[in-house]
Image (cartoon, rainbow, N blue to C red):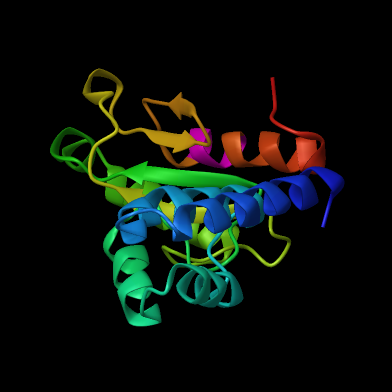
Amino acid sequence: MTEVQTQKLQALRSYMQEIKDRENPESYLIGILHKVQDVYGYLPREMMDEVAQTLLIPTAHIWGVATFYHYFNLEPIGQHVISVCMGTACYVKGAAAVLETLKKELGVEVGQTTEDKLFTLQEARCLGACGIAPVIMIDEKIYGELDRKKTIDIINQYRRAGSVGKPK
């Protein structure tokens, strides 16, 4: 764990201690889970158990919240998250082929992370970029008007950048 992560975890634990004595501490659950995910990148079971014990909330309730909201990850995710838009415009213009290209190129299914922990592949209902369909979003950047070749070229740019960061 990095020093920044350790500091965030200490701040999270202090925050939970402060919250547990408030009226309706369970009303802070989503915010706390966001903070846990900010520290780890996902929601480790041990931390969900710690939240349950600290706030006196049943673990089953925490799991229910964590699995209901799409934002929360229950498994570690890759350095880059690829979301393939499967909205109507993208689907009609070839999103299924883009998704298949990514699955083959990365060797993973939707919801999985590559062995090198570089990519996690997800589907999205709509990314709001219908005019340049089909699109993917990698982290916060949208790529549009995709076909098989463009999709592979984009992935290879990220591979070349490796763990250094995002390609230019």
Seen in the picture, residue 93 relative to 31 is either above or below; the reply is: above
Image quarter hosting the N terminus = bottom right
Most common SS among magenta residues? helix
Seen in the picture, residue 136 relative to 102 is either above or below; the reply is: above
> Depth check: 163 or 154 in front?
163
**Numbered label tally:** 0
Residue at point 56%, 58% (across, down): 17
Q: Splitting the image into 4 quarters, where does residue 142 fall? A: top left
Residue at point 33%, 61% (across, down): 26
Asked if residue 56 is among those painted magenta in the image, a careful observer would answer no
> Depth check: 25 or 31 in front?
25
Q: In the picture provided, is 146 more to the left or to the right than 90?
A: right
Residue at point 52%, 66% (across, down): 108
Q: In the picture provided, is 75 more to the left or to the right than 10?
A: left
Q: Position of residue 10 (x, y in %)?
A: 72, 52
Q: Position of residue 59 (x, y in %)?
A: 40, 79
> Depth check: 88 or 34 in front?
34
> Depth check: 114 or 63 in front?
63
Among all residues in the image, which is located at the extreme right?
A: 3
Residue interval drawn in magenta: 149-153
Residue at point 23%, 18% (across, down): 131
